[in-house]
Image (cartoon, rainbow, N blue to C red):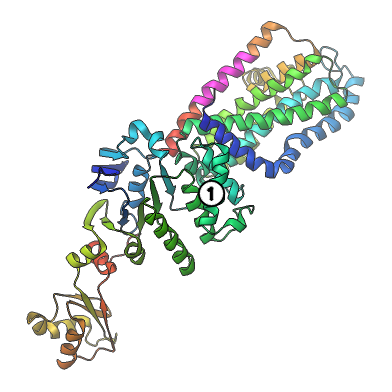
Amino acid sequence: MAEPLVRARGLVKRFGTYTAVDGIDVDIAPGQAFGFLGPNGAGKSTTMRMVGAVSPPTAGELRILGMDPAVDGPAIRARLGVVPQTDNLDLELTVAENLLVYGRYFGLPRAVVRERTAELLDFVQLADRAGDRVEPLSGGMRRRVTIARALVNDPDVVLLDEPTTGLDPQARHVLWERLYRLKQRGVTLVLTTHYMDEAEQLCDRLVVMDRGRIAAEGSPAELIATWSTREVCELRFPLTEGGPGPAAHADALAPLVARGLAERVEVLPDRLLLYTADGDAALSAVLAHGLQPVSSLVRRSSLEDVFLRLTGRTLVD
Amino acid sequence: MPSAAAVSFFRQRLTAHRHYWRSSAIGSVLEPVLFLAAMGLTLGALVDRGPGVPGGAGYLAFLAPGLLVAAAMQTATGESSYPVLGAIKWDRVYEAVLATPACAVDLLAGHLLYVGFRVATSATAFLLVLLLFGAAESPLVVLAVPVALLTGLAFAAPVTAMAARLEEDAAFAALQRFLVVPLFLFSGTFFPVSQLPAALEWFAYATPLWHGVTLARELALGTVDGGSALLHLGYLLAWTAAWAALAARALERRLVR
């Protein structure tokens, strides 16, 4: 593997007594699309801010582009593009002005910034809005302006903190397609998300974070292979007051599970999930055993199953 | 010398200002001109028929340089309160700038450059009006503009330091009510502070506004003497430098965590 663009060892960030990031090791290779997955409060954004050389680590080792952010912050930031979780465009400026003024912070000559601004607004399909004020633009458009602005210095690494949170499906798909193009040009992407489809679409490599630590690491396929089964059979049962709940049905299935019906059975308030290599076979066996779910679904395992297994189903706020 | 990043931030603020200069000129230029007309001409006629202001100048000539400097305080305070907190917290413009090679101290320097620009242009516009009113007695009146600039920065620095520590904007209303307005009224803009009770008179001497107003007035009336001018300048420079250092630290703490 080439020298990693980002290398962290035992990276820790504390705010007072709260530990946001609790000793993580990360290696991000050039050209990779690397994802941080995790529920809210897992430490993803804090990690991104440290990698962005704007938040000094409390402990551990961090090298970005081979440099130490404590010493070479400005030199590191000169080669990064940052798309923060909340858009921070200058609302008093037009779309084009946002890019034009931003490029100057990187010491680029005016003519170069002008040329890149035109190219980038084309790239994010906003050339026709160049002279419009940012304020009235839709969320998806603002996001695209922020992404265009992050590319104005032709960065080696682009950091995207929840790039599509809050956008409608159309806007998300446009963004994914644009990010995929960037990746094909060889730009390293580092992103955080809690959308599993986003991670599967974009990331070559992922870490799942939970409470400041890394719970698992690998490619999407590796993670599914390690932490889930090929298929999942979902059985939904009626929620009748005093009637047998999914737990009782799970007990009824225990003998089948013992004979290899599923690798794992998860009991939810309204459903049973059978994790198995062959979902159709499991469903047939369940029906043959006399159980009558109100509905059933056989599907491929997804990153979402991995995510929920690793980070739990409890709500995190 | 401000860094390249500070100049970039100054340029960013100027770009925004181009869209808004008309509305900001109303507060920074038109308002003091209205004061000058209302008080300088009408009230001034009454004052001049009585014992008048000490030193024998006409009231209009006494008031005009004071208003010029007091307006600088208002402009600088306005530009350093809500806009700074907004750039930290609401629009997060500072966060965006810090993602570039720029540092917190560049933001402060760029901000002060911009406030300086706003104050200097407004003061120049007001100076032209003042000359039209025939309210200057000495050509040294043009030096009232740099005095206004320095006085503006003397307010921009502490108000920026304050904004960098705030979570809510309610304190700005209190700042305006309990500090800016009383200073405007009682720091020698409208009448000599010798009219105040002794305790308040000494308080007025400690404020940067009194130093700015007094120096600008002495220049406009042609009564300036080197020693006291240096004292006023020294006070304003030391005050501004100290608060700018505190503001830089406050911004760094707020933004780089």
Output the chain of dot 1: A
Left or right of A201? Residue A136 is: right
Residue situated in front as seen by the camera: A308 or B63: A308
Left or right of B39? Residue B245 is: left
Give the residue drawn at x 55%, y 36%.
B9
**Residue B146 visible at all:** yes
**Residue B85 visible at all:** no
x then y, percent, for residue B169: 56, 44
Quadrant containing the C terminus of chain A in the rendered view: bottom left
The residue to which callout 1 is attached is A89
Left or right of A224? Residue B174 is: right
x then y, percent, for residue A199: 33, 62
Q: Quadrant of residue B143?
A: top right
Crowd around label 1: few <14 · some 14–19 · many ≥20 (10 Å)? many
Is residue B240 within the magenta segment? yes
Q: Indicate the secondary structure of the residue bearing disc 1.
A: loop
Q: From the viewer's perspective, is residue A102 above or below residue B70? A: below
Q: Quadrant of residue B37?
A: top right
Q: For the stretch drawn in magenta, what is the main secondary structure?
A: helix
- Going by the numbered disc 1, the residue's amino acid type is Leu
Is residue A290 within the magenta segment? no
Give the residue drawn at x 37%, y 39%.
A53
Give the residue drawn at x 43%, y 63%.
A177
User: What stretch of residues is rendered in magenta?
Assistant: B233-245
Q: From the viewer's perspective, is residue A42 above or below residue B175? A: below
x then y, percent, for residue B237: 59, 18
Q: Quadrant of residue B7?
A: top right
x then y, percent, for residue A5: 30, 44
Q: From the viewer's perspective, is residue A249 above or below residue A74? A: below
